[in-house]
Structures are given as C-alpha cells and as structure tokens.
Image (spheres, grey):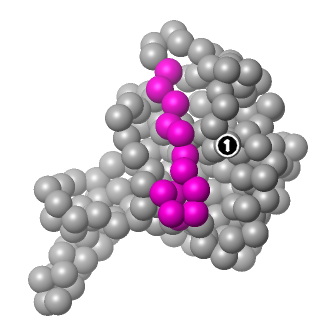
Amino acid sequence: MTRRANGLTAVLALLAMALPGLSFAATAEEIDAAVDEALAEFFREVKGGREFVAASRGVLVFPQVIKAGIGVGGEYGEGALRVNGKTVDYYATAAASIGFQFGAQAKTVVLCFMQQEALDRFRASSGWEVGVDGSVALIQVGAGGSIDSTTVRDPIVGFVIGRRGLMFNLSLEGSKFTRLAR
C-alpha cells in the first residue's frame, strides 16, 4: 500500500513539474474553446473528418488528455459532448495504469457516436468505462488517408491525435468518462 501511495505521489509531482500551466478545473467557455480548436485540428488531420462528425449522432471531444507516470501512471482530461454541433454536456476522462512508464504526454481524443442507441446509453450512465460499458473502435487513418461514415459500422468510433498527428496502436480500454457539472 505504501508503495502504491509513493507511486501516486511521484505521478502527481511529475504532473506538477511538467505541466505548470495545466488547470483541471476549466470553465465551460474554456472547454468549448479548446474543443473548437481540437475539432479544427481533427478536420485538418483526417480527410473526410468533417463529414464523418456531421454523420455522427454526437461527438465527445477531449482536447487535452494528459498522461504521466513513474511506474504507476494516470491520465486525465476534460471535454464536451456535442450533438448537432451544440454542447450538451461536459465530461472528464480518467484512467490509471501500472507497468513500465516514465514521463508525460498530451493527446486529443475524439469519440464519434455513430448510432443513437450508443449515444443514449452513454448519456444515461453515471460513469461510462471503455471495455466495460461499451467498446470504442479506434480508427487508423494513414497519411493522406480518409474516413467515410458509410463504410464504418461500429457504434462508437474513436480517434487519438498526438503532437505528431494521428496516433496508432493505442487503446482507450479502462478509460472512464464522468459527467461534469459546468
């Protein structure tokens, strides 16, 4: 137990040192502005992305998910769920991990709800966890590739964008999404 507490303390210290400008309590306006920027980047990065989002029943965007760890790791981010282009709810995402890890990184996560039933189940939950309450199909789009909503049959489709563009071979398993009061 002491080892776990020491690991958590180290992760928090790393976050505090590596990310001094990070605020975990963003206002609704700050989240909305960051979501706008993240979607603009997504549309530049993914050919057909604008049409894909328009065809979805809703899109959940986490503009900046910070992951840090020293043996024990964690990640956290805040974002917004948009339906028909309008923000309807705010969410936080969090996950923990154990294993070889050292450092910190930031990523953007975009989840498209392609089926109304999947969106309704997500919104009705008090805390939704990837892999437990539903699965997310991570789409890999190569350089210059495009995405088309008519060929994707998954109820929830996810994209992860890092500093170097669309990231591959990642998993959102274990990520938990919780509604925020904003």
Percent position (x, y) of residue 27? 68, 67
User: Which residue is nearer to you in this view: 162 or 125?
Assistant: 125
Residue at which label 1 appears: 155
- Residue in the image at 81% along x and 48% along y: 116
Q: Is residue 20 above or below residue 42?
A: below
Q: Which quadrant, please, contains the N terminus?
A: bottom left
Asked if residue 130 is among those painted magenta in the image, a careful observer would answer yes
Residue ranking furthest to the top: 144
Q: Is residue 64 left or right of residue 41?
A: left
The answer to which quarter of the image holds residue 87 is bottom right
User: Which residue is nearer to you in this view: 46 or 170?
Assistant: 170
Magenta segment boundaries in residue numbering = 129-141
Q: Which quadrant, please, contains the C terminus?
A: bottom right
- Residue in the image at 12% along x and 83% along y: 3
Hey, what amino acid is under mark 1? Answer: Pro
- Residue in the image at 45% along x and 13% along y: 143
Q: Is residue 119 left or right of residue 163?
A: right
The answer to which quarter of the image holds residue 119 is bottom right
- Residue in the image at 40% along x and 32% along y: 167
Magenta stretch, main secondary structure, is: loop
Percent position (x, y) of residue 68? 29, 59
User: Which residue is nearer to you in this view: 25 or 111?
Assistant: 111
